[in-house]
Amino acid sequence: MKGPLLRLLRPRRASPRPLLVSGSLWGRAQTAAVSPASSTQAGSTMRPTGRYPIPNKKDLPYDIVELMEEVEMKSGFLPNVFSVMSHRPAEFRAFFAYYNAIMNKERGRLSKADKELIVVATSIVNRCPYCVIAHGALHRIYSKKPALADQVVVNWKLADLSDREQAMLEFALAVSHADNITEEHFQKLEAQGFDREDAWDIGMIASFFAMSNRIAHFTDLRPNEEFYTMGRIPRDKEKAETP
């Protein structure tokens, strides 16, 4: 999602007229535009996506529509957080711009898998199904470890984590719990090769997703069904088993 999200940071000219969008996902979303959003899969027994109405794409600003289309094209589906946040376009831009700044930055010692594991561990504390499920899927993809996120969900202290990952999660969870952060916390990170800037990154991810978790709570944001199976079966095996 790095490329599409960077677009939010660039100034844009207003579109001369609303951009109309077609497609199966948005066909269903538009039908539910005056009621709580529906699940992304036809015939689903899952609860609705959220409790706020999702705007028609023709009523959204051009840059937001363009981002949604690009994410949907690359992912094969549109993550529900994009639909729910589109209810407030200015907040949509701010939310994803900050997400991009902390999750897609080039510098630092945190890998993409590290960042997703932080999101999973801290979102468990905040009891956020959307972030646990969605970012657990992203961790499986980036880490190529289909079981580790599930282990962290059950009990991170018993998960197959390296000493480095344990120190990283311990710091993130201390921030998430609003513990009194002391020099000892930083020293434990430094013992595993992290510096103060890495600690900032870990703490900022934990802090941002504490906010994100609470947005998910009051909007009743539900995860897409696609997230549940992502990264569990290698793509080559999936293709081989497809009739």
Image: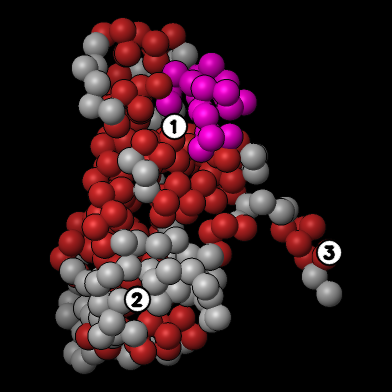
Q: Which mark is residue 29?
A: none
* Mark 2, other Cα within 10 Å: few <14 / some 14–19 / many ≥20: many
Q: CA distance from mark 3 to mark 2?
A: 35 Å
Residue 142 picture location, percent across and down: 57, 45
Relative vertical location of residue 197 with respect to residue 30 in this rendering, above or below: above
Q: Mark 1 or mark 2, which has the lower sequence index?
A: 2
Please give the name of the residue rendered at 18% of the width and 61% of the height, measured from the top-left corner. Answer: 91
* Mark 1, other Cα within 10 Å: few <14 / some 14–19 / many ≥20: some
- Depth-wise, is mark 3 or mark 2 nearer the camera? 2
Relative vertical location of residue 234 with respect to residue 160 in this rendering, above or below: below
The residue to which callout 2 is attached is 37
The residue to which callout 3 is attached is 240
Relative vertical location of residue 125 with respect to residue 157 in this rendering, above or below: below
Q: Quadrant of residue 7?
A: bottom left
Q: Magenta stretch: dominant SS?
A: helix
Q: Which mark is residue 110?
A: 1
Q: Quadrant of residue 56?
A: bottom left
